[in-house]
Image (tube, helix red, strand yellow):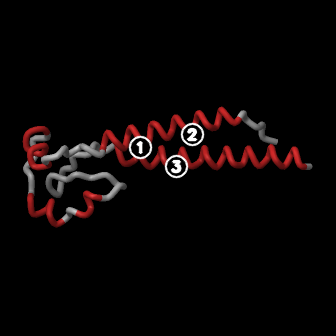
């Protein structure tokens, strides 16, 4: 049978993964800055396609996946941000489920 862990162990893992999730999210969120055209041309050296940006405007307002595209080929959001967000969200959820399973085992062992 699996060994139960202290509640603080699970809470620390949940807090750590949540902090990492938030920090990665806020690292990718402002990738374009306030002026996307300027960020594309000056910082990334890419041409800004206004028609493409305006036709895909609602995609860039989504919480996940984060995207700020200069044109059809280049995204200002680093390519590692979205996979890291997905992995950290799944990790956080699995820690919460593991903590709940651990708590239910403790309660069941005390009741029976």
Identify the secondary structure beneath mark 3: helix
Q: Residues within 10 Å of mark 3 (few under 14, many from 20)?
A: few
Judge depth for marks 1 and 2 and give the one in front: 2
Relative to 23, 88 lies left or right: right
| Residue 24, image x, y percentages | 38, 40
Is 22 displayed left or right of 47 in the figure? Answer: right
Q: CA distance from mark 3 to mark 1?
A: 10 Å
Residue pointed to by mark 3 = 90
Q: CA distance from mark 2 to mark 3?
A: 11 Å
Q: Is residue 111 above or below residue 3?
A: below
Q: Above or below — where is 65 with respect to 24?
A: below
At horizontal 31% and vertical 52% (from top left) the residue drawn is 66
Which residue is more in the foreground, 72 or 77?
77
Tell me the residue that label 2 is attached to: 14
Measure the alpha-carbon separation of dots 1 and 2.
Answer: 16 Å
Q: Residue at x 78, y 37 (%)?
A: 3
User: Where 50 falls versus 40 (above or below)?
Assistant: below
């Amino acid at each position: 049978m699996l060994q139960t862990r202290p509640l603080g162990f699970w809470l620390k893992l949940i807090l750590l993964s949540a902090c990492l999730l938030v920090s990665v999210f806020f690292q990718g969120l402002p990738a374009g800055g306030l002026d996307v055209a300027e960020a594309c041309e000056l910082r990334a050296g890419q041409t800004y396609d206004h028609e493409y940006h305006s036709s895909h405007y609602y995609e860039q307002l989504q919480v996940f996946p984060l995207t700020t595209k200069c044109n059809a080929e280049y995204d200002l959001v680093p390519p590692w941000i979205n996979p890291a967000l997905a992995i950290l969200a799944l990790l956080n959820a699995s820690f919460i489920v593991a903590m709940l399973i651990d708590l239910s085992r403790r309660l069941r062992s005390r009741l029976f």
